[in-house]
Each structure stands twice: as C-alpha cells, then as structure tokens.
Image (cartoon, rainbow, N blue to C red):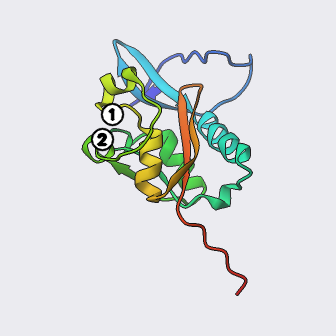
Amino acid sequence: MAVEGEEKKVIVKNGIPGQKVKFAVNKMRKGKAEGRLLEIIEKSVLNALNNENCHILSLKSIASIDKKANEKGILEFAGKYGLPFNTYSAEELNSLEGDFTKSDFVKSVVSVDNVCERSAIAESKGELIRRKDAGNGVTVALAINEPVISWE
C-alpha cells in the first residue's frame, strides 16, 4: 500500500504466492489496513447472478448504505460495468417492511439489521430474487422489479 509516497507491506490472506492482485483499502484501524480485493467483489456479484441464471447485463444498478458511498471496490466494479451506484441512509433502509435476513453484528455497526437485501429492495422497488449471499467479506442480494418483455 502506498500512502503519499510511503510504502508498506500488504499481506493477502488465502492468496497464492506470486499472484498479482488489485486491492482497495477501505479504512485504517490501529495501524492496520482493512480492504477488499477488487476481484472478490466482481466474483461475488457474478456468482450470485449466475446462481439465478442472470447475466451481468441484466443489472440496472448497484445499491448499498450511504456509509459505503466512497468504497473503492464497489465504485470500480460499478465503473467497469457502467452501472450507477446509489446509496441509502440507515433511516431509509430501516423504513422498509419485509422479511430480511437479520444480523445483530451489522446492526451494531451501521444501525441497520441487513444492508444488502434492504438496499436491493430500495433500489429496485421490487422483490428479492436472491437473498443475502455472504463470502470473503462481501454480501450480495438481488432484487427485481416488474420485468418488461418486448419483441418490438
């Protein structure tokens, strides 16, 4: 990691020796960096889509909580696929009614019991087609609004 001319060693957990990776630092805590491999975000989204027999081109947008508005990994993924990235406040997400996969840990951190499913519903104004998929520090949920099929 380089911080204004300063270089530091980065340790990638579960990496393959000699493998080149891109990463984004999300925050610094007690001298240690926390971040995500950019490839992990893409892989998580593509896996969720594949599990629902959906193509990346079927995505309309990406959504999350406003605290993630500047998260480099999400922004790079959105940019790569030309998708808008919209965020919602904890209050907006908490106002949604429905059956969501609750997490006490997530609620303790961001004041919302589930971010990915609630964000998907808020953004699509539809219904979940894939509940929370979690792995490698990334959570993904998919929602769909009324599909439109046209042969025109």
Residue 35 on image: x %, y %: 48, 27
Occupied quadrant, residue 91: top left
Image quarter where the C terminus lies is bottom right
In the picture, the disc for residue 112 is 1
Camera-side residue: 40 or 49? 49
Identify the secondary structure beneath mark 2. Answer: helix
Dot 2 alpha-carbon crowd within 10 angstroms: few under 14, some 14 to 19, many 20 or more: some
Residue 15 appears anywhere in the view: yes
Give the answer, above or below, for where 19 lies relative to 42: above
Residue 41 on image: x %, y %: 59, 38
Residue 114 on image: x %, y %: 41, 34
Q: Which residue is mark 2?
A: 94
Camera-side residue: 54 or 15? 54
Amino acid of disc 1: Val
Identify the secondary structure beneath mark 1. Answer: loop
Horizontal placement of 8 versus 130: left or right? Answer: left
